[in-house]
Amino acid sequence: MRRNLLSLIQKRFLQTSSSSFTVQFLVNSCGIPLQSALSVSKKIQIDANNLHQPQSVIQFLKSNDFKDTHIAKTIEKWPAVLHSRTEDTLKPKFDFFIKNGFAGQLLPQLIVSNPDVLRRHLGSHIKPFFEFLKPFYCSNEEVIEAIMRAPWLLSVPLNGDIQLNTDFLIKEGVSIDRIAKLMQWQPRVMGQKHDKMVYAVTASKKMGFQSGDSMFVRALAALVIVSESTWRKRIEVMKSMGWSEDEVLCAFKRFPPLLTCSEEKIRGAMDFFYNTMELERKSLITYPHFIGFSIDKRVRPRYNVMKVLESRKLIEGDWNIATPLTISEEKFLLNYVTKYADKAPDLLQIYTDKSERVNT
């Protein structure tokens, strides 16, 4: 009994001692904050008598342009990297990524975003995934851009949903270049469950979208991202603000991301358009993308400028709000702010003012 108790005490002491050293190593050698180090120490133990492995990993990362913050974040997300073999496991993968354009800070950014990729087999997963992406893009730079937009894709089994979804879309008549744009624009759509993709394609076609149309992939992306119950809630919100269901679907056909906007966003946008700008519903049905614009960052500042120009008679007659709301920031500044700087020098201040009302 006494011998068992002594053994238990010794074991507990060794565990505590090991855990304490691990925390010290994570803080002092890896740059991890103490609170995070305490959490990470529950997932990995560092042997004080065998530091060669973790130290060689840290040195290897530094030699590949990893800054201290990159190293700390990588270890926080995947502590087991400290037990990786640099020559056999890490170096071949790093060499492959560098050879394929992940130079400079792109490689640390990729690994920090998804350190799980270091667990993936180079020959059976990483290389085939690159080969899978290449036919969809015109250059290696576009492949890199696609991966950087969604690093988690490198962890998705290639023979799973992403391959099924790709093959299915091609079979349904979606062109390669549109699939490529979908991967760049909404990469998580391609990794969704296959039955959800089938549902989205079927629903899109029932609404009148054709697989060869540019709007088709935007519609199916919205249907994949938004659950059916959430879809119904957002339609009900719009109906509560005077829209018929047919009008909602008409607007959706013109601007599929419409129903990816939250209920709060839809209410706030419509409140501003109806009560401040006094737009009619038919205007929003014609220009539903207005609802997707940021009210505070885009709509209100531009509307304030237009109202000042109108009140000071710098623009006369009926003017269509669609143009000033839709054009780029550069063009708006050129056409409606800089152009009138001599007659209205306060326009830039009015444009950047975040307050809801301005003096005209």
Image (tube, rainbow, N blue to C red):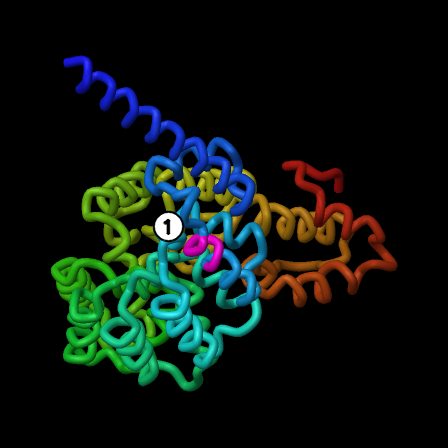
Tell me the residue that label 1 is attached to: 78
Residue sitting at x 29%, y 57%: 222
* Residue drawn where x is 24% and y is 78% of the image: 174
Q: Quadrant of residue 11?
A: top left
Above or below 113: residue 158: below
What is the x, y in percent for residue 196? 16, 58
Instruction: Please say if 279 is above or below 92.
Output: above
Q: Is residue 207 visible?
A: no
In this rendering, would 25 be left or right of 192? right
Between 306 and 256, the one lying in front of the other is 256
Q: Total of numbered circles in the picture?
A: 1
Q: Which residues are magenta?
A: 52-56
Q: Position of residue 33 (x, y in %)?
A: 53, 37
Q: Is residue 105 visible?
A: yes
Dividing the image into 4 quarters, which one contains the N terminus? Answer: top left
Q: Name the foreground residue: 286 vs 108.
A: 108
Report crowding for label 1: few under 14, some 14 to 19, many 20 or more residues within 10 A (C-alpha): some
